[in-house]
Amino acid sequence: GAVVSQHPSRVICKSGTSVKIECRSLDFQATTMFWYRQFPKQSLMLMATSNEGSKATYEQGVEKDKFLINHASLTLSTLTVTSAHPEDSSFYICSARDRVTQPQHFGDGTRLSIL
Amino acid sequence: AQSVTQLDSHVSVSEGTPVLLRCNYSSSYSPSLFWYVQHPNKGLQLLLKYTSAATLVKGINGFEAEFKKSETSFHLTKPSAHMSDAAEYFCVVGFSGGATNKLIFGTGTLLAVQP
């Protein structure tokens, strides 16, 4: 149980394009979803927290107009990297949780490469 | 303030020998502590969690961790390493941030298992 699916697993695109990453909870209702970014050989850094039906809460230093997050249903959250540039290349990981007392369950991540 | 320190960035063991991955935490409150494992280009998998119940926590794949409040430690151990245990391991502390629980990740320990 508690499976989180993230899609796509890898994307390569040109600078200036926008990229959408989907995060789905397959067998539970995710009231809260989290988006992380991981640089090579580094730990995960929380970008934003989203609760279903409300605006995402961004961490300090994360541009909300650059990284658009939508959590329109209890099983789906999307992260859109707008006008992507090479410095946005990274490994993006989502996680989901149904209740505050439960641990976060992670997707397999998306490797984003901007040329 | 909450923080977590993983004392070793790399640990190398021989197959069949014990594994010890060290973690120290700092928390103003009674913490929730987790160990996650990440295989290359994958998301994170929960190994075990401590949430103020038994101080010795047993997880999946033969791993366990002991919460020692006096030492503010939560070291991860396994009696006998397998080749499949080679991965990155993250010690994580959870804390309440507003309406959600946030996770703070350690910098990770890369475990290598030699044949």
Image: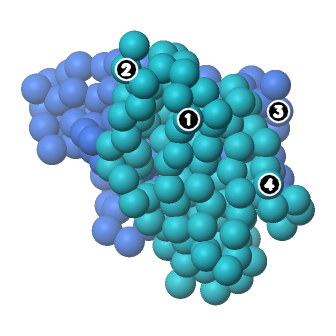
> The disc labelled 2 sits on which kind of residue?
Gln
Disc 4 on helix, strand or loop? strand
Disc 2 on helix, strand or loop? strand
Q: Tell if the residue under mark 1 belongs to the same chain as the one under mark 3.
A: no
Q: Callout 3: residue from which chain?
A: A
Q: Tell if the residue under mark 1 belongs to the same chain as the one under mark 2.
A: yes
> The disc labelled 1 sits on which kind of residue?
Pro
Q: Position of residue A39 (x, y in %)?
A: 27, 44
> The disc labelled 3 sits on which kind of residue?
Phe
Tell me the residue that label 2 is attached to: B114
* Quarter location, residue B88: top left
Q: Callout 2: residue from which chain?
A: B
Tell me the residue that label 1 is attached to: B18
Classify the position of the N terminus of chain A by image quarter.
Answer: top right
Question: What whole-number distance in Å separates the C-alpha atoms at marks 3 and 2?
Answer: 39 Å
State which mark lies toward you, 1 or 3. Answer: 1
> Which color is chain B depicted in?
cyan
Q: Tell if the residue under mark 1 belongs to the same chain as the one under mark 4.
A: yes
